[in-house]
Image: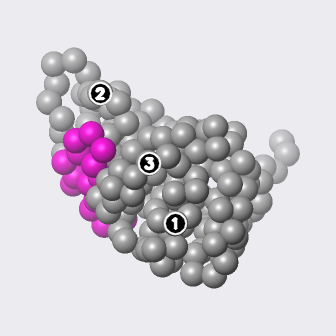
């Protein structure tokens, strides 16, 4: 059998990172991603020590977080869980839910740095007011004709999640917008 070498969404063996002035954009392949759906008649459990959030909100515990993605459905993100079966770990904690692994289906990019520059950059990319992706919020939106999730963990960082097949286009859009601010 051929030796398989894992690659990131951008096609490299290591995560890509680039800085433009006060902003740094990084590929985040170490994040485990699982979709979590409640079955009819079941109450929302505590997942990874987190209460599942309301629409547009984010809950966090340590490096893990959850955000609403559709009625009775959430995305659960696990820091350092990008390899292995993250969904199986979630399913073991919530056997009455439907859980599917999304780790390889999505590409994750963090934007870190100056809050003002970060928000200026995003106004060029998405047609949303900054409150829609304020700290503690998560939302789905269009960016350069692609659907992405914007997840705001803290003032100086924003996580962009999009389909892995669009990884190169998302990377290009983020880099182009950040470069134009310098």
Residue named by callout 2: 71
Q: Is residue 90 visible?
A: no
Screen quadrant of the C terminus: bottom right
Q: Nearer the viewer, mark 3 or mark 2?
A: 3
Q: Is residue 59 above or below residue 142?
A: below
Q: CA distance from mark 1 to mark 3?
A: 12 Å
Looking at marks 1 and 2 on the same chain, the residue that comes earlier in the sequence is marked by: 2
Q: Residue at x 31, y 66 (%)?
A: 62
Residue 23 visible somewhere in the drawing = yes
Residue 177 x/y as whole percent: 65, 62
Q: Secondary structure at mark 2?
A: loop
Residue at image point 52% right, 57% down: 123
Instruction: Mark 1 vs mark 2: give the one in front.
Output: 1
Give the camera-side residue of 39 and 16.
16
Say what secondary structure mark 3 lies in: loop
Q: Check if residue 49 falls in the magenta segment.
A: yes
* C-alpha span from label 1 to label 2: 31 Å
Q: Tell me which segment is drawn in magenta.
A: 47-66
Q: CA distance from mark 3 to mark 2?
A: 21 Å
Residue for badge 1 = 120
How many residues crowd mark 2 within 10 Å: few (<14), some (14–19), many (20+)? Answer: few
Q: Are marks 1 and 3 in contact (CB under 8 Å)?
A: no
Mark 3, residue position:
128
Q: Which color scheme did the rendering employ for the protein? A: one colour
Tell me, for residue 176, which label it has, or none. Answer: none
């Amino acid at each position: 059998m051929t030796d398989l070498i894992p690659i990131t969404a951008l096609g490299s063996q290591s995560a890509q990172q680039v800085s433009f002035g006060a902003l740094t954009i990084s590929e985040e392949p170490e994040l485990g991603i699982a979709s979590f759906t409640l079955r009819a008649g079941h109450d929302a459990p505590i997942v990874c020590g987190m209460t599942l959030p309301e629409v547009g909100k984010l809950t966090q515990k340590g490096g893990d977080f959850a955000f609403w993605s559709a009625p009775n459905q959430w995305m659960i993100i696990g820091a350092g869980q990008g390899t292995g079966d993250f969904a199986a770990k979630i399913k073991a904690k919530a056997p009455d839910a439907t859980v599917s692994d999304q780790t390889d289906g999505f590409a994750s990019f963090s934007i870190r740095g100056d809050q003002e520059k970060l928000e200026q950059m995003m106004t060029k990319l998405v047609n949303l007011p900054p409150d829609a992706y304020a700290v503690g919020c998560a939302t789905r939106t269009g960016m350069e004709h692609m659907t992405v999730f914007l997840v705001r963990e803290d003032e100086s960082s924003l996580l962009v999640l999009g389909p892995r097949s669009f990884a190169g286009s998302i990377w290009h859009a983020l880099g182009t917008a950040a470069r134009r601010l310098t």
